[in-house]
Image: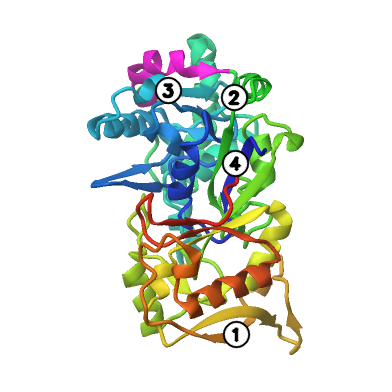
Amino acid sequence: MPKNVVVLGTQWGDEGKGKIADLLTSKASIVVRSQGGHNAGHTLVVGDKKVVVRLVPSGILHESCQCLIGSGVVVSPEALFSEISELEAAGFKDAHKRIKISGACALLLPIHPAIDRGAEKLRGKNAIGTTGRGIGPCYEDKVARRGLRVGDLLDMERFSERLKNLLKYRNFMLKHYYDEPEVSYESIMESIMALRDKILPMIADISAILADARERGEKILYEGAQGSFLDIDYGTYPYVTSSNTVAGGCCTGSGAGPLHIDYVLGIAKAYTTRVGGGPFPTELLDEIGQGICTRGKEFGAVTGRARRAGWYDAVAMRRAVTINSLSGIALMKLDVLDGMDEVKICVGYKLKDGSVSNLPPLAAYEYGEVEPVYETMPGWTETTFGVTEFDKLPVNAQKYVRRLEELAGVKIAILSTGPERNQTIFIEDPFA
């Protein structure tokens, strides 16, 4: 019986991971975030409550679940405690007591958003489309070994010295390269000291907690952020995030070994969306695309930015299956395609030389030059909204789902037919 399940996105993010993570967390005793920061939001709908979590794992809605933030996550103390305040205001009073943070997490400081915004401004028309929250610059400092960690808060003398060194470098860039105002040492220290006493009791050895839980036979959910094609190595670089969003990143960012993972569940919409810049082969710049965006309420949970929409991309999914070793797929928002005369699936990419590939290129510029090859299937007029049994779906909707499954070479384990927990079809339970 699988006890360690990874949930991650297989497209360009915003696939609906929050709902599935929340559903599966009801079966788990621990949920752990392994990468990203507060640039990614998971929207959870429970009855008349709508909660958006960013740094905090989705398991926070379940009182019996411990929520862990692994070393691969970049943590802004201000963003974290702002989110905890939102959760407490929504009725989750003990949220802070159930969260533990790795001391190895990189600290996201007020200097990082300033650098992020300056860099995007300088890029001009070539802007990547970041959220401007400082995620990239924080990861950059981490990899360059000049950044600070959550564990550094235990020794403020050392913290102070390292912060001054970081600011010498970063403020020079702000002033002389980005032509932006500097961020003062005093302002950062003030913001840190205001929250230090709150964060210190939350520091823990996340890898050890996971190891102990595995020995006890507890079920653990590993929650990824963003999507596979925003991965720093395998995404449409440079239009990507700054961390490894694929299944391997869940191991390195949490402290779990690869052999500790039993099931990898990939989340995908029944169509495709993307936020920000970068290539998007199946993008629909017409009334069909607008209709999908409207019905799917395609706006970012964190930024509110409108998403770009297009047909389902089976070519990209083939790559996602391989790089994540997917065990199953959760297909989201099937109901958004209700009422369409026909639906299309991208089954190949036509390249510049006229040949057709069934796998995507790795270079973003090549990605932007491909032409999608579509397979057209009849749509359905009946509603799929809220349906909880596969056999009760419209026949053409069933055929569409089975075709996606066939093209991916991986079973569709879960179907979502609405935002609520109970608007779900479980074909296979990843924890069963």
Whether residue 283 is situated above or below residue 417 in the rendered picture: below
| Residue kind at label 3, given as amino acid type | Arg
Q: Quadrant of residue 196?
A: top left
- Judging by the rendered image, the residue that carries numbered circle 3 is 98
Which range of residues does the magenta coloring cover? 187-204
- Judging by the rendered image, the residue that carries numbered circle 2 is 104
Q: Residue at x 42, y 88 (%)?
A: 341
- SS at mark 4 in the image: loop
Q: Which mark is residue 374?
A: 1
Mark 4, residues whose alpha carbon is within 10 Å: few (<14), some, or many (≥20)? Answer: some
| Label 1 close to label 3 by CB (< 8 Å) | no
Q: Disc 2 versus disc 4: distance between alpha carbons?
A: 29 Å
Q: Disc 3 versus disc 2: distance between alpha carbons?
A: 19 Å
- Sequence-first disc among 4 and 1: 1
- Sequence-first disc among 3 and 4: 3
Mark 3, residues whose alpha carbon is within 10 Å: few (<14), some, or many (≥20)? Answer: some
Q: Disc 2 versus disc 1: distance between alpha carbons?
A: 46 Å
Q: Disc 4 versus disc 1: distance between alpha carbons?
A: 35 Å
Q: Residue 7's spot in the image, x, y percent?
A: 57, 46
Q: Residue at x 73, y 58 (%)?
A: 322
- Judging by the rendered image, the residue that carries numbered circle 4 is 431
* In this view, the mark in front (3 or 2): 3
